[in-house]
Image: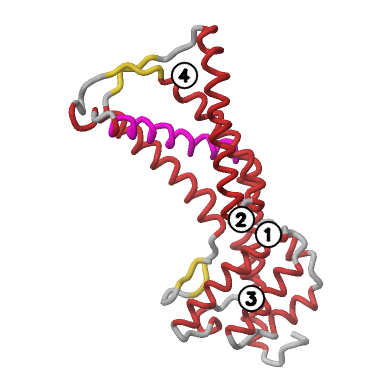
Amino acid sequence: MDLVDDEAEAERLLDSLAGYMSQAEKNGQSLDGLLSQSPHEYAVFLVEKPVTNEEFRRRYHTLIEQSEELKPHEKTQVNREFDWAVDRLNDMKLKLQDIEMRDVSFLAYTKIEAMKSSRRAWNQFGWLLGMILAFAYANLLLVMDDVFSLRLFTAPTGMYAIDYFGFILPVLLTGAVFGLLTRFRHHFQTLGRRVLFAIFIVLVYIGFVILTQPVLMALEWSFLIQLTPLYALVLLGLSGFMALWTLIEFIWRNTRCRLGNDDVILYY
């Protein structure tokens, strides 16, 4: 009220803040970052709204860089994704203030909470996500074997025995290792490091095959199933859907934030 002469505008800003806080609490987002700020400084942020897209971009970058809740590589990612959204608006010759009613600090805070949520998912359940992806990959290997052995074309309904437990256990263990290592994924930005990481995962898989097969034979653990190429395709479809749904629902959507109104909506 002290900063804005127009009482209606002050009420609009307060209603916007109240609505944002209500939405954040409904989504289970922490309000610690918002509550730790100086009320007066935050009010100034609300009142002094940027006009041009470049002002929005600079202010957003400033808020992100000042945040103590994100790691350096996360700040780089967040700024890059917001820049992408601003560039799309520039291409369409639209001003962000014309399609977005929320303050830029709301946008930055929402994105920070989304990144923290994604980080927790990878750090706490990365091993599980890795195993889900590995399960889909294991069934892909089965289908590839059916393709190159021509079983898929010559005898799609013909059965063949496979020790499914012995086949899939090394893959799942490798997936768990892959998932655990995803917390260090920001170190694999260059192509060379990604190639080395892929080679390392392959070596881990070979190592698990060499180690687990004798153990399974000694324990006499096996799970023989009569598989058909068509059933392998069904397994691939189910496991692939499960893997993609998990990534989209728990990772991709949790890091994408809505920008704009009903006419123009971007997710950055």
Q: Is residue 196 left or right of residue 162?
A: right
**Lower position in the chain sequence, tag 3 or tag 1:** 1
The residues bearing labels 2 and 3 have C-alpha atoms spaced at a distance of 29 Å
Q: Is residue 239 magenta?
A: no
- Quarter assignment of residue 36: bottom right
- Residue 70 to residue 147: above or below: below
Q: Secondary structure at mark 3?
A: helix
Q: What type is the residue that disc 1 sits on? A: His
Q: Secondary structure at mark 2?
A: loop
In the rendered structure, which amino acid carries the disc numbered 3? Val
Quadrant occupied by the N terminus: bottom right
Crowd tier of the residue under label 4, counting other residues whose Cα lies within 10 Å: few below 14, some 14–19, many 20 or above: some
Against 67, is 231 above or below? Answer: above
Query: Looking at this view, is 172 or 189 the one in front?
Result: 189
**Residues under labels 2 and 4: Cα distance?**
34 Å
The CA distance from mark 3 to mark 1 is: 21 Å
* Amino acid type assigned to the residue bearing label 2 in the image: Gln
Q: Residues within 10 Å of mark 1 (few under 14, many from 20)?
A: few
The residue at which mark 4 appears reads as 166
Residues in magenta? 126-147
Which quadrant would residue 191 be assigned to in this image?
A: bottom right
Q: Which mark is residue 189?
A: 2
The CA distance from mark 1 to mark 4 is 39 Å
Asked which quadrant contains residue 175, the reply is: top right
Q: Residue at x 55, y 18 (%)?
A: 212
